[in-house]
């Protein structure tokens, strides 16, 4: 193995604000502790929580790096005590609690996965956060089953495009909401049976029509606001609505009689604050049930654009236009 440098380039949040507050810095290369590995990062995914952290509304959990970046891919270059799942030189991808916008990043050994040969390193860097978010919320919390209908809001996002592929792979019918024809076309190409342009169509009516009046069995929502009650209208009896973000308002006035009459379940989660044990369990489930699709190349991230690490501000600006389709990645 190469001798590790003492210093590395990172991109830090200089103060809460717009993309311009993301600034390159030089920091010491971290050392892995018990159960940890050090990854020489080659690709880091850009996600909405990074934008929220940069703006000051999503602080890192206690003990996590103050640097943004929740998913990375690269080479294992150092092992902490008790780290036995991976060895020096392995190419891995991993969810991290922070610190991804850097040349080197600490990851939990139990949360890192070997990169399948069907994925490029950039694709691998775009995968862990979205894959784990979709797996946990759609399948573990939402209980999506073969033959059911999944409605995904924000279908062209990194999470949305992964949800389409996973839903289809496991035998569900997937409908999505999007804001343009280009996004609709991309989602249908990935496997959605219908893409609803929320600017010109009523997604409740379209879902009812597409399901013969029954509604969606599982709804993955990152919008909130007035979508909450409309989700209740679009859901099937015994439907499950899973909340993962609020691009709109986190508050709404809702007629909860609909929840009772349809026997709905409305749940939600955030991934970053979950315990390492919880995340390791998700990784184990993904390795058993999803990794075969990744190895075969049947599931892979839809890539929007790539930026050098030092241009992370441009990557955030791209995300905030909401014109991206799929994943934005930093190349290191």
Image (spheres, rainbow, N blue to C red):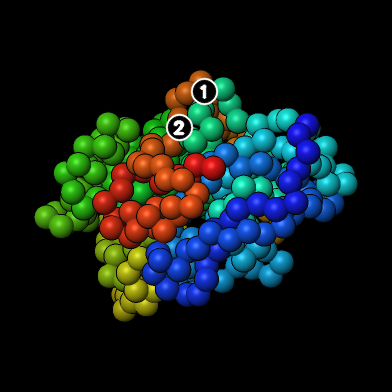
Above/below status of 115 relative to 135: above
Above/below status of 109 relative to 28: above
- Give the image location of residue 104, x and y in percent: 66, 48
User: Considering the image in quadrants, where does the C terminus appear?
Assistant: top right
Q: Is residue 72 left or right of residue 213?
A: right
- Give the image location of residue 247, x and y in percent: 35, 65
Quadrant housing residue 203: bottom left
Mark 1 or mark 2, which is nearer the start of the sequence? 1
**Residue under the image location 35 percent in, 41 percent down:** 304
Q: Is residue 264 visible?
A: no
Secondary structure of the residue carrying tag 1 is loop
Q: Is residue 135 left or right of residue 4?
A: left
Determine which residue is flagged by label 1: 118
User: Considering the image in quadrants, where does the N terminus appear?
Assistant: top right
The answer to whether the residue labelled 2 contacts the one labelled 1, judged by CB atoms less than 8 Å apart, is yes
Secondary structure of the residue carrying tag 2 is loop
Q: Nearer the viewer, residue 236 or 165?
A: 165
Residue farthest along the left direction in this orientation: 200
**What whole-number distance in Å separates the C-alpha atoms at marks 2 and 1?**
8 Å
Q: Nearer the viewer, residue 304 or 61?
A: 304
**Residue under the image location 82 percent in, 53 percent down:** 33
**Residue under the image location 47 percent in, 23 percent down:** 297
Determine which residue is flagged by label 2: 300
**Residue under the image location 46 percent in, 45 percent down:** 308
Q: Nearer the viewer, residue 164 or 36?
A: 36
Q: Is residue 87 visible?
A: yes
Q: Is residue 194 left or right of residue 240?
A: left
Above/below status of 162 relative to 48: above
How crowded pointer 2 is (Cα within 10 Å; few <14, some 14-19, many 20+) is rated as: many
């Amino acid at each position: 193995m190469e001798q590790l440098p003492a210093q590395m380039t990172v991109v830090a949040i200089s103060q809460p604000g717009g993309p311009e507050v993301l600034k390159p810095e030089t920091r010491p290369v971290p050392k892995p502790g018990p159960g940890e590995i050090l990854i020489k990062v080659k690709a880091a995914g850009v996600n909405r929580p990074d934008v929220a952290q940069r703006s000051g509304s999503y602080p890192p959990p206690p003990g996590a790096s103050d640097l943004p970046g929740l998913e990375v891919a690269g080479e294992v270059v150092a092992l902490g005590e008790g780290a036995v799942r991976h060895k020096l030189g392995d190419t891995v991808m991993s969810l991290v609690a922070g610190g991804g916008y850097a040349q080197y990043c600490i990851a939990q050994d139990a949360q890192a996965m070997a990169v399948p040969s069907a994925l490029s390193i950039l694709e691998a860097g775009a995968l862990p956060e979205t894959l784990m978010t979709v797996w946990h919320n759609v399948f573990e919390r939402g209980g999506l089953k073969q033959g059911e209908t999944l409605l995904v809001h924000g279908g062209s996002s990194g999470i949305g495009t992964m949800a389409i592929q996973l839903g289809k792979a496991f035998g569900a019918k997937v409908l999505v909401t999007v804001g343009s024809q280009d996004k609709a076309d991309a989602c249908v190409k990935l496997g959605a049976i219908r893409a609803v342009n929320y600017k010109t169509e009523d997604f409740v009516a379209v879902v009812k029509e597409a399901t013969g009046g029954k509604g969606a069995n599982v709804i993955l929502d990152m919008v909130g606001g007035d979508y909450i009650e409309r989700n209740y209208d679009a859901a099937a009896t015994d439907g499950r609505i899973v909340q993962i973000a609020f691009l709109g308002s986190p508050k709404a006035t809702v007629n909860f009689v609909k929840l009772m009459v349809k026997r709905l379940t409305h749940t939600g989660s955030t991934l970053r604050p979950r315990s390492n044990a919880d995340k390791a369990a998700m990784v184990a489930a993904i390795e058993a049930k999803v990794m075969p699709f990744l190895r075969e190349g049947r599931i892979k991230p839809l890539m929007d654009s790539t930026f050098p690490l030092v241009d992370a501000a441009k990557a955030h600006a791209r995300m905030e236009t909401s014109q991206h389709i799929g994943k934005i990645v930093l190349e290191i």
